[in-house]
Image (tube, helix red, strand yellow):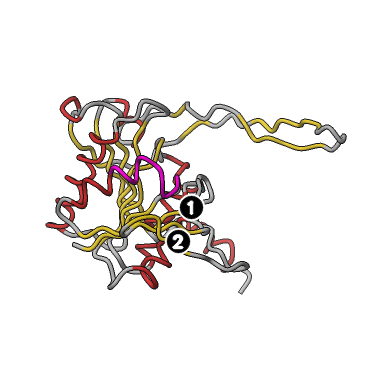
């Protein structure tokens, strides 16, 4: 298969480099990724400045764009033909719960799905001591399986892998998004010239412990497999709003 590999940690991130090596054993892999870290840029697409592509090594390209830009450039400019898969990762840190809305890693996979290409995002659930080779082996297993069975509808597969040796994993668990508990704090500080500036901080590591969620699965040692739909309409509340607005017609 021809695979477009991208991320939001940058073209030199060990996560993308390791996954690229593993995938290259069986597949034709092109890497198109930001030239620097673009974490938490979500689904930004660059419209107001020119985008440039620089070849870093054979079939590896860095750009000054966002993760979503990288998919657009990869599909339309870099690759010799339309890829069979778009894979985004391996991200250094989890992408679970509401975090998927901020994640450049997940956004790149969604951009691939927007283009009608089977796409998945891969993250390793740790902040340090990353076992990238183990995670890459798991990601390859998922890709091989999905390559055999195909994707279900217009979905993106969001994979979160516990940071443990592969033989210690309990298996796979198909999950829904959980709920992270944020306690963000905006810190106000003053620069040497007396001007105010701000840092957004806080600890977002807490979450609701509910069975069936991505957080719960990873906590229990399972690889979390979460299908994300491209249609974010809340169909469950449509009837409520129809009652409100029917009277206005």
Residue at 27% of width from left, 25% of height from top? 220
Crowd tier of the residue under label 2, counting other residues whose Cα lies within 10 Å: few below 14, some 14–19, many 20 or above: few
In the figure, 161 relative to 71: above or below?
A: above
Residue at 52% of width from left, 64% of height from top? 242
Quarter holding the C terminus is bottom right
Residue 54: numbered disc: 2
Q: Earlier in the sequence, mark 2 or mark 1?
A: 1
CB-based contact (under 8 Å), mark 2 and mark 1: yes
Quarter holding the N terminus is bottom left
Residue at 40% of width from left, 26% of height from top? 128
Write down the region rendered in magenta: 9-18
Q: Position of residue 230 (x, y in %)?
A: 39, 60
Residue 155 visible at all = no
Which residue is labeled 1 in the image?
A: 35
Closer to the camera in the image, 96 or 178: 96
What is the quadrant of residue 61 in the picture? bottom left
Circle 2 or circle 1, nearest the eye:
2
In the figure, 201 relative to 31: above or below?
A: above
Residue at 26% of width from left, 58% of height from top? 29
Closer to the camera in the image, 87 or 119: 87
Tell me if 5 is positioned left or right of 196 in this view: left
Closer to the camera in the image, 178 or 81: 81
């Amino acid at each position: 298969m021809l695979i477009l590999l991208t991320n939001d940690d940058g073209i030199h991130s060990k996560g993308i480099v390791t996954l690229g090596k593993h995938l290259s054993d069986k597949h034709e892999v092109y890497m198109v990724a930001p030239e620097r870290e673009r974490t938490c840029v979500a689904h930004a697409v660059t419209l107001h400045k020119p985008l440039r592509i620089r070849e870093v090594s054979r079939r590896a390209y860095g750009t000054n764009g966002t993760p979503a830009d990288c998919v657009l450039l990869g599909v339309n400019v870099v690759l010799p033909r339309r890829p069979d898969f778009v894979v985004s990762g391996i991200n250094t840190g989890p992408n679970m719960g509401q975090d998927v809305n901020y994640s450049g890693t997940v956004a790149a996979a969604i951009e691939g799905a927007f283009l009608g290409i089977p796409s998945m995002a891969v993250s390793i659930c740790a902040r340090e001591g990353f076992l990238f080779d183990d995670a890459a082996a798991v990601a390859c297993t998922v890709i091989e399986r999905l390559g055999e069975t195909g994707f279900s509808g217009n979905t993106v597969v969001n994979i979160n892998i516990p940071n443990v040796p592969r033989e210690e994993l309990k298996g796979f668990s198909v999950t829904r998004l959980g709920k992270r508990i944020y306690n963000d704090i905006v810190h106000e500080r003053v620069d040497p010239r007396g001007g105010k500036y701000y840092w957004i901080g806080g600890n977002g590591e807490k979450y609701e412990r509910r069975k069936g969620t991505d957080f719960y699965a990873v906590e229990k040692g399972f690889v979390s497999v979460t299908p994300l739909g491209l249609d974010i309409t809340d169909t469950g509340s449509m009837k409520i709003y129809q009652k409100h607005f029917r009277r206005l017609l």
